[in-house]
Image (spheres, grey):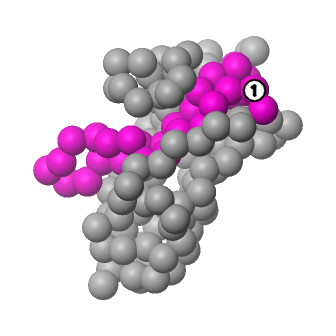
Amino acid sequence: QEQLDESGGGLVQAGDSLRLSCAASGHTFYLSRYATAWLRQAPGKEREFVAAISWGSADKTYYSDSVKGRFTISRDNGKNTLYLQMNNLRPEDTAVYYCAAGYNWPLSRISDIQYWGKGTLVTVSS
């Protein structure tokens, strides 16, 4: 059964850094075959795309304006793991972060997502 497992969330102070990981498991579930993304959902708000990376060699990336220049998405195909490096965190980055995989590029619509992780909570204090 295909599964995505996020890790790396926690409580940090504004200006700190965190790296989220998302490990894929399941027979023949290779992240390199999918466009993959990180989304987040803050309390009382809709789920939003944060960053996405294309399949294969992962040579295309997308970032929301709110995280551009601070967050970096990457994928290690050998480890079948997706990452999100988050620097200079702000209180408004507080949310549950989800990793996701889909077939379309750009992966920018919730309806295009085939697989979801369960999420990891990031809390940024001021």
**Is 43 located above or below residue 33 in the figure?**
below
| Residue at the disc numbered 1 | 56
Q: Where is residue 84 shown, x and y percent of the image?
A: 58, 54
- Total numbered labels placed on residues in the image: 1
Q: Where is residue 53 shown, x and y percent of the image?
A: 60, 37
Kind of residue sitting beneath label 1: Gly
**Is 27 located above or below residue 121 in the figure?**
above
Farthest right residue in view = 78
Highlighted magenta segment, given as a residue range: 29-57
58 part of magenta stretch: no
Residue at 20 percent of width and 54 percent of height: 43
Q: Where is residue 89 shown, x and y percent of the image?
A: 44, 73
Residue 86 seen from this side: yes
Quadrant housing residue 47: top left
Residue at 48 percent of width and 48 percent of height: 63
Position of the C terminus, as image quadrant, is bottom left
Kindly state the secondary structure of the residue where label 1 is placed: loop
Q: Where is residue 116 shown, x and y percent of the image?
A: 46, 29
Towards the viewer: 118 or 83 = 83
Quadrant housing residue 75: top right
Position of the N terminus, as image quadrant, is top right
